[in-house]
Structure formats: structure tokens, C-alpha cells
Image (spheres, rainbow, N blue to C red):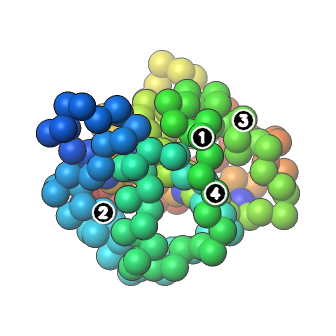
Amino acid sequence: MKEIHLIRHSKSDWSDTHLKDKERPLSKRGRKNARFLGKYVKKVSFVADVALVSPSIRTSETWKILQSFQNITKDTKIISEIYEAEYSDLLGILRSLSSKINSVVLVGHNPGMEDLANYLLLRNNSDSLFEKFPTSSFISLVTEQKDWADLGRQSCRLKRFWVP
């Protein structure tokens, strides 16, 4: 059994209009919600084999806050392809993982994260499990696939979904 954990970055700060999208830090509310999520991951003793994090400032800050509450993993990789990724790009990243990895965290952005969750859980593209997949959301999926390369549509089931 393998686990996929998707975390959407916390709310970003839009006050500095000169910053590029990738450079935007967390807002005050974003830091607060990241701490709420940090308390939750500590409460459920959440751990993973590897974390794959988008290179944006807001995803890095979200991840650092979570790690300050719970040492989720010692293996964190910044993956440039996660930034602005569509679900098919994220699926490709997951499919390329070593079969020795049993649990992965992806820290990224919408709409790719929400679309990936829907793809892995539901039968077709017109369905959506979520009315919203807000910032600071955390979803855990479980699959019986032994090899990441075998991930496909409706190949997972929902383990948990948390929103701030």
C-alpha cells in the first residue's frame, strides 16, 4: 500500500505588486493557517518517506512551518516542475518515484493539486470531489498499487481531508 499526501500552500501575500508570483511570501493569515495545519499533522503523527515541494516562496514557507511542528520527513526535494504544474505533470512526477518509496508529500498549487486528487479518486473529469480545495488544505490518498508507475484514474481512495 502506498500513500499520497497533497498539501496546497497557505495563503500568500499580494501587498507587494513588484514581486513575481513565485516570490510571494505567506500572508499573516497564511502563516496562521499553516500553524493550524502544523498542529493537525502533529496530532495525527503524520510522517512520509519524501516531500516534493514547489520552488515558490509560499510553498517553502508553508513546508517549513509544518516541519517545525512535526518532523514529517528528512528527505525534502524542491522540484521546479511542481510550480504551475497541471495534474498530468504531477501524475508524471508521482509515476517516476522509486517503488521503494511508500509515502510521498506533494506541496504545491491549484488547480493542479485539486485536479490530481479528483483524477486519482473519481471516474471522469466532469466530477469533482471538492467544492473548494482552499489554501492550507491537506488530503491523504491511499492506493493498493505496488508501483508508482501504475497510478491511474480512480486508483486511490480517500484517507483524510483537512481544511483550516
Q: Look at the picture and state if 45 lies above or below 81.
A: below
Residue 44 in view: no
Q: Is residue 115 left or right of residue 18?
A: right
Q: Look at the picture and state if 50 lies above or below 139.
A: below
Marked residue nearer the N-terminal end (3 or 4): 4
Marked residue nearer the N-terminal end (2 or 1): 2
Marked residue nearer the N-terminal end (3 or 1): 1
Residue at x 24% of width, y 31% of height: 18
Front tag of 3 and 4? 4
Residue at x 40% of width, y 49% of height: 57
Label 2 sits on residue = 34
Mark 4–mark 2 contact, CB under 8 Å? no
Q: Look at the picture and state if 145 lies above or below 66.
A: above
Query: Disc 2 marks which amino acid?
Result: Ala
Distance Cα–Cα, label 3 vs label 4: 16 Å
Find numbered disc 3 in the image and state the secondary structure of the residue it sits on.
helix
Distance Cα–Cα, label 2 vs label 1: 22 Å
| Label disc, if present, on residue 92 of the rendered structure | 3
Q: Position of residue 16 (x, y in %)?
A: 18, 38
Q: Position of residue 76 (x, y in %)?
A: 61, 63
| Label disc, if present, on residue 10 of the rendered structure | none
Q: Position of residue 151 (x, y in %)?
A: 74, 41
Q: Quadrant of the N terminus?
A: bottom right
Query: Disc 1 marks which amino acid?
Result: Ser
Distance Cα–Cα, label 3 vs label 1: 13 Å
Label 4 sits on residue = 77
Q: Quadrant of the C terminus?
A: bottom left
Find the residue positioned furthest to the top.
126
Front tag of 4 and 2? 4
Label 1 sits on residue = 80
